[in-house]
Amino acid sequence: MELKLMMEKLGAPQTHIGLKNMIKEVDEDLDSKLSFREFLLIFRKAAAGELQEDSGLHALARLSEIDVSTEGVKGAKSFFEAKAQAMTEASRFEEEIRAEQEEKKKQAEELKQRKAAFKELQSAFAQ
């Protein structure tokens, strides 16, 4: 799910099968997950020209703005930690907006229920 969200945020959304294929291509320990080491392998393979042009990993490598061979592993780690932090902050902002929208819906529903209760009370006095 994290890979899916990251690819969407980077503007290169992938299908579920595409994501599985991306993971499978660099999953050295066969746990169907990407470790940080395996994630860095994407960029090493891209630099070596070992990724297919139409693969999601190639798109990811192109979208990243860092050259692991130049920056080194620590530089890449810092870069991706900063990207992850930015994505977390964006997600937090989106979550706050959703919470506000839910609160407005809840308030609107409560108002609707109060109006309905008032109309019931009003009809009891009208008779």
Image (tube, grey):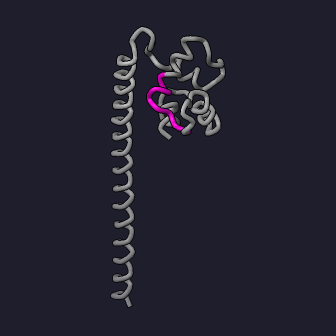
Residue 79 x, y percent position in the rendering: 37, 21
Is residue 36 in the magenta section?
yes
Q: Residue at x 39, y 25 (%)?
A: 80
Q: In this orientation, which residue lies closer to the viewer: 2 or 91? A: 2
Q: Position of residue 7 (x, y in %)?
A: 52, 30
Depth check, front residue: 127 or 6: 6
In the visual, does 68 lie left or right of 16? left
Please, which residue is most extreme toward the bottom here? 127
Left or right placement of residue 93 versus residue 10 in this view: left
Look at the image and tell me in which quarter the C terminus lies.
Answer: bottom left
The single residue placed furthest to the front in the displayed view is: 29
Residue at 65% in and 18% down: 53
Task: Give the image location of residue 74, x and y in percent.
Answer: 35, 18
**Residue at image x 36%, y 77%?**
117
Q: Quadrant of residue 113?
A: bottom left
In this view, 56 is above or below 53: below
Using residue 112 as the reference point, say whether residue 64 is left or right of it: right
Q: Is residue 58 magenta?
A: no
Picture coordinates of residue 55, whole percent (x, y): 63, 24
Residue drawn 44% across the image and 16% down it: 65
Q: Is residue 87 above or below residue 106?
A: above
Q: Which residues are magenta?
A: 32-40
Question: How many numbered markers are drawn?
Answer: 0
Could you say which is closer to the camera, residue 63 or residue 123?
A: 63
Pick out the residue farthest to the top. Answer: 70
